[in-house]
Image (spheres, rainbow, N blue to C red):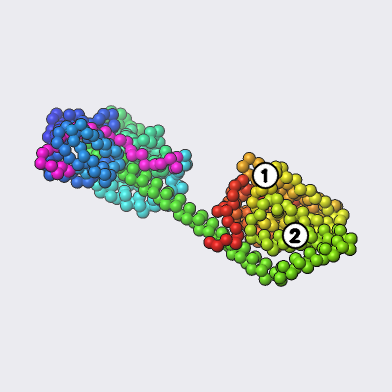
Amino acid sequence: MRVGLDSGRIMGQEFEWGQIEWLQLCDTEGPSSIGLGSCTLYPNGHDEPHHHYNEEQVLYGLSGSCIQVVNGKALTLGPGLWVHVPPGSTHEMYNPFATPCRFLLFTSPVLRVDLFDERFSGRTSSWNKNRTLLDRSNLDEIQEKFTTVTGLSVTFTDASGEVLVQGNLPEFCQFCSLCSGRCEFISRVEADISGVSWLQCRYGLVAVKAPVVVSGFTIFCVLCGYVSLGPADASVLAAIDDLAAASRVPQEKLLSLLSSVRRVSKNRLITAAELLRVTADTLARTVLMAEREMELQEFRASLLKEQRQRAETEAELERAKLQLIEAQVNPHFLFNTLNTIAQTAVLEGSIETSRLVYALSDLLRFSLRKVGKLVTLGEELENIRNYLYIQKQRFPDYFSYEIEVGQEEVLAVSVPALMLQPLVENAIIHGFPVSGRKGHIKIAAKTCRSRIVVSVVDNGAGMSAQRLAEVRSQIHGSGSAIPGPSHGLLAVVKRLRYYFGASSRVEIDSVEGCGTSVTLCWELNLPREDRQEGDSQ
């Protein structure tokens, strides 16, 4: 590349593939101006693929034609046509034609590429959270390479200024930090997180500082420099006097240490700042990609857990079906026998006996034929009525019950068969015998917004606070199985979640000596995949 100079500024650049004549240069210290140049791409000229880390370009065709490739997409540039090269993109251009292609080149520096999408917005990121994403060995390697390229000392700090990786500071900076307790550059917190900050300490040394920002939050900072741009002025000499008085080190010794600090040109530091900006953007990309990978791993783990739970539920249902099949002894014969007994009771005038036999027959038929399937809530409640009728015949003055339905349409909602019987059975068998008073069971079903709410409430013995905590732990999946009346409740919980997903809820409240309340709640829609428990996969 051959460079032409005019008053110390670059005005022309010549390459193997063509040349650029600059009409206006970018401000090298910030994005305050736009660069404008006239570019010529020679016949058969080819500018190899390159990356636009911290600038964007607009190309406007004047004469001839060429091919511009932006992020792998080939575009033709000719008179009156334009091509946009966004920041962070890969760019390539070539001229396969016999005539040169001339176009205007507009270039604008950017402080950083927008690396982050909306799903990360609002996340409070911190180095402590992301320490595993870029460990110390990564930062050591980055620091070593950056120092090799620029010849400048590099330090990594977290957002609060705590040093993560310390570079080789000049001897004067080491002494200053020892006296004051901390480097002025490191402890300074800059309000602007949009790009590189220029820092100068009281002793005239300069550095540049770039934050690594993810979703608007600074993960950590990259600091490089610790160099001098020129001789000490009066303010620097005054600061040296103060340091000499505080440290009791001769002023001449401090000035000697200060003069040994490496002196560089401002342009050299500007170049380092641009490289530092690219480094910060690259680190931010790395952190973001690592976060996405961690989220993906968490999702996979959650999916595997759900699949295991689903497999366990299906296996348990299969075992229950097998046990039921093994327990069946010619059900048709059993039902025919019960019907015969009921008809005989009617002929003999025993109406209550016949009703009891018919209720038992319906209860058994429901249990044998509907288990593992979906039924309407109306059918489930009718089965509960048969069960309660039989229990009332056994214990006439033992308990009373009521069934309350809020809306008629609730009766058409699909539910797993035998969902309520374990809850009612728990109240009768475990709640009432020790309560010392006549029991009462209330079953209620209603809709609440877009959800179905079914509750079973009794005034039985209730549970102790410790036992209630154990049962709640079991139904929320955080406790081990404990023998007792909660076994039937756990079966209800698993089946409800199997059909209606994780959004379904089971809540239990109980006061010892007062009673127990169990509430089932799920979305008012079809069960998950609209499946029966007996369906094949």
Q: Nearer the viewer, residue 69 or 242?
A: 69
Q: Residue at x 64, y 60 (%)?
A: 372
Looking at the rendered structure, the kind of residue marked 2 is Asp
Local SS, label 2: helix
Q: Is residue 512 left or right of residue 375?
A: right
The residue sitting at the front extreme is 347
Residue bounds of the magenta highlight:
94-121
At mark 1, the secondary structure is helix
Q: Is residue 460 magenta?
A: no
Is residue 437 visible in this depiction of the protein? yes
Is residue 269 left or right of 362 when viewed as pictured? Answer: left
Determine the image quadrant of residue 170. Answer: top left
- Would you name the residue on which mark 1 appears? 409
- Tell me the CA gap for discs 1 and 2: 24 Å
Is residue 15 shown above or below 133?
above
Q: Which residue is mark 2?
A: 362
Residue 176: give x, y in percent of width and height.
Answer: 35, 40
| Amino acid type at image mark 1 | Glu
When the figure is inspected, residue 363 is found, relative to residue 41, above or below; the finding is: below
Residue at position x 48%, y 53% from top?
299
Q: Nearer the viewer, residue 202 or 46?
A: 46
Q: Position of residue 130 (x, y in %)?
A: 43, 48
| Label 1 crowd bin: few (<14), some (14–19), many (20+), radius 10 Å | few
